[in-house]
Amino acid sequence: MTAEQSISGSPEKVPGRFYSYLNSAVKIIGSYKGEMPLAHFLKNFFSGEKKFGSKDRKQIAQLCYAYYRLGKDFTDLSFEQRILLGLRTTADAAAVAWEPLFEAYQVPQHFSGTVFPWKKQLSPSVDAALLEQSFLTQPDLFLRIRPGNEAGVKQKLEAAGISFKLEGDAIRLNNAVKADTVLDINREVVVQDLSSQQTAGLLRFFKTLKAHPDSYRGSTLQSPISIWDCCAASGGKSLLAWDVLAPAELTVSDLRSSIIANLKRRFREAGITSFNALVADATMSPAPHFRAHFDLVIADVPCSGSGTWSRTPERLHYFNTSEIKTYATLQRKILTNLGHAVKPGGFLLYITCSVFHAENEDQVAWLQQRGWKVKEQQVIKGYTLKADTMFGALLQKEQ
């Protein structure tokens, strides 16, 4: 029996393409095992299915993401029911056209379940209910305006008729906006989540502490600040540190050579020509010439990414709590090695995009036991702002 024959509603009211979208989503979900980000899996899937146009791909992808936004719950429902329940719960006005299928598949009217069951593992200041609610919504797109480009960026967006909101140096945009067709990415603006941008507050605090002779006996503020971003990835934190702390002697590293190649290209686009980039494993002891070398080490460490699961809701479905311990162990290995690279009295900026205390406050407490002084720590709560949630801590090494 086909889906069209089995439904109890009125099939003639349902456009045939909606069944095609739903069946395609079921096919994708049945074959996807969480081995890569869903976005990459969808890209590969659609590359082999040329029959789908851009609107078709958007609809099918929306159904897949709606399914995973429900986490591990609702296992008593069929794939079709679960997809449609996720759509009804998360898509708001966009789901109206699907009403006949909601009726046809007897989709529950109201959401009642547990999207995020790991509440006991949360950092103490995280509101579990608000966090859980945030996973039902796709975060916005955020840009950071680089210094000196404020007026020009606003003028370009207004001239292009693009709706935006300003929040300090941050621009909030709809995810569908193609910012790179209007703005010079990396030179004028940086694509960077709102909460990630807010780690600039910890960088500015570091700058204040470094300028105070009683707080830090390192080099004077007039001399370039030596910075090592040891898990640089795409370089977002490095670019932020450059804009906040320049003049700076910047070193960036990552385990992956492909990442470093992309980072160099991004720095060229940003107009940053004076930096040291290398492939290095942060879990290994730094090279001898790195010992006691840096005023500031930025450690945006590998983590569960649980503060970003609104963007990658498939992780809600495939996450296993054993990963918390795995990441916490890796983080301590990195932190142990980085300590040797910080000058006496220098600083460590520890960052995660996790909401779990084992990756956040517990790691800071562990560092305190080893003589580090906590100058500031905070959960940057993006879950009410359609943004990621992050954790940041600024610590100082013993003089």
Image: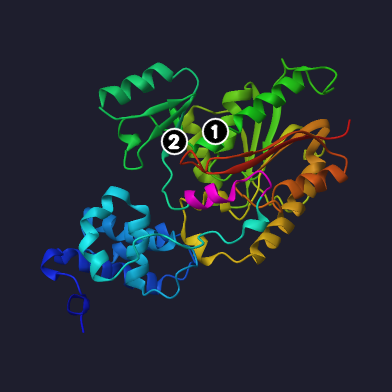
Residue 125 shown in magenta: yes
**Residue at the image position 49 percent from the left and 41 percent from the top:** 387
Describe the element under mark 1 as helix, strand or loop: helix
Residue 197: give its label: 1
> Can the viewer see residue 250 in this picture?
yes
Residue at numbered disc 2: 142
Q: Residue furthest left?
A: 12
The amino acid pointed to by label 1 is Gln
Mark 1 crowdedness (10 Å alpha carbons): few <14, some 14-19, many ≥20: some
In the image, is residue 296 above or below residue 140? above
**Residue at the image position 76 percent from the left and 22 percent from the top:** 210
Residue 89: % across, % down = 37, 56
Describe the element under mark 2 as helix, strand or loop: strand
**Segment colored magenta:** 123-134
| Marks 1 & 2, CB-CB < 8 Å contact | yes
Residue 261: give its label: none
Q: Residue furthest bottom?
A: 1
